[in-house]
Image (spheres, rainbow, N blue to C red):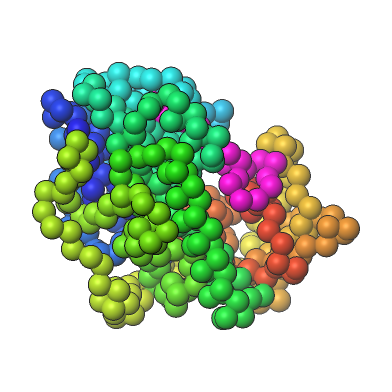
Amino acid sequence: MKFHFIANACGIFVGREGTQLLMDPWLDDGVFEGSWCHYPPLSTTHQDLQEVDAIYLSHIHPDHYDERFFDYPKDTPIFVLDSKYNFLAKNLERFGYTNIVKCRTGESVDFMELTLTLFEPFSKHLYHESKVGNLIDSALVVTDGSGLTAFNANDNTPDLDACRMLKDRYGEIDLAMINYNAAGAYPSCFQNLTDEEKRNEHERILKRNIDHLINCCDTLLPRAILPFAGAYVIGGKQWKKNQYLGTTTWDDCARRIREASKHCAVTMTENDVLDLKTLTLNRPYTPINESEQQSYIENTLSKISYPHEQEKHPSAESLDSAIRESIERLQGRASRYQISVKSRIKVTTGEDMHWIVNEGDEEYGVNLEFVIDPRLLIRILDRRAHWNNAEIGCHIDIWRQPNTYEPDAHTLMQFLHL
């Protein structure tokens, strides 16, 4: 079995008989409401990938399933997790895909010479208490009958209990593909933090995540680790937030793994192919040049225009009406999904317009304020954009006093729309 890397969480497993399983093909810049981009820039297109035998989609976030450009034969087998809500499967059905294979967590499915096993979220949240937690992610284990095994965690990073389960079930794991980044708004968008505090939080989060990755691999004992998924840079007017993201390059992650452990860390760039038996690449690896990356962000990606910037500002009356109705509907959805939030939540456009979304618990004492462009807000309310994508894309500035993280408060906001 071989693994052909493309970018971020996209790549192709190639079985011993040549079967090709494509995973999470995000190829085009501009997901998360326009801001997420690739570095290095890609040459691969969706047209280049039309001959694959099947596709695995880990979840519905656009850096894994970019519905803008996802265009494959409608009868292509597409493997997805059979979850409680099936957001992804419903979306694929809406776009006319007819061969969606819903896999129950932990149950193995044979496809040609490959065996696939999908796993639901291993934990609600790895680092914080959450009553709701992760609703959408999945992980994948692939074997090809020759004794080779790859574990692709995607954004579903395992806890240590899950690592012990995987080790007991599969024995030797040849390749562990594990996320090391904390993609999202923190700390880059949090205006209650000084620049120095943002830099300190950036480093703290990276160390936490990479330490956890190493701890996982101390249990999994893979022959090789591939730092995987969550590799992106921010373009457009928010480009200066790159320096505070909870992310780093895969080169830096691999270096930290090697310095802190004896694990074998592998790095790959577009069209590198790893042989899982020999753990060798098809060609010499080209490291990321960070000065060239910064120049590309400043001189090219910073000029990107976001979709909402192409639109006129909504009238105050139409925006107020839409958000008030959306807040009412949010409360119903919160009840349906059993989401109870203690933070007081306010949304403002920065133009003397604000709305209280959640009154919160006065004793808990956390005030959470989201500042958002009214053009983006109306797109979210009209379902032409999504709150979670806007937040992950760094389009929303956030004030949090005190700086206490309640994950379910951010989950609640995902249901703000008509």
The image quadrant of residue 289 is bottom left
Q: Toward the viewer: 145 or 139?
A: 145
| Left or right position of 13 against 387 | left
Q: Residue furthest right?
A: 363
How far across and down, in percent of the image, does residue 144 sit? 24, 25
Residues shaded magenta: 117-136
Residue at image point 42% right, 37% down: 220
Q: Taking 37 as reference, is 226 above or below it?
A: above
| Left or right position of 137 against 268 | right
Q: Toward the viewer: 23 or 287?
A: 287
Residue at image point 48% right, 67% down: 245
Q: Residue furthest left?
A: 283
| Left or right position of 336 against 255 | right
Is 133 included in the stretch rendered in magenta? yes
Residue at image point 75% right, 49% down: 341
Q: Is residue 314 visible?
A: no
How far across and down, in percent of the image, does residue 117 sit? 39, 26
Q: Taking 21 as reference, is 9 above or below it?
A: below
The image quadrant of residue 149 is top left
Q: Taking 381 as reference, is 376 above or below it?
A: below
Residue at image point 22% right, 56% down: 269
| Left or right position of 283 against 237 | left
Q: Main secondary structure of the magenta part?
A: loop
How far across and down, in percent of the image, does residue 353 sit? 70, 71
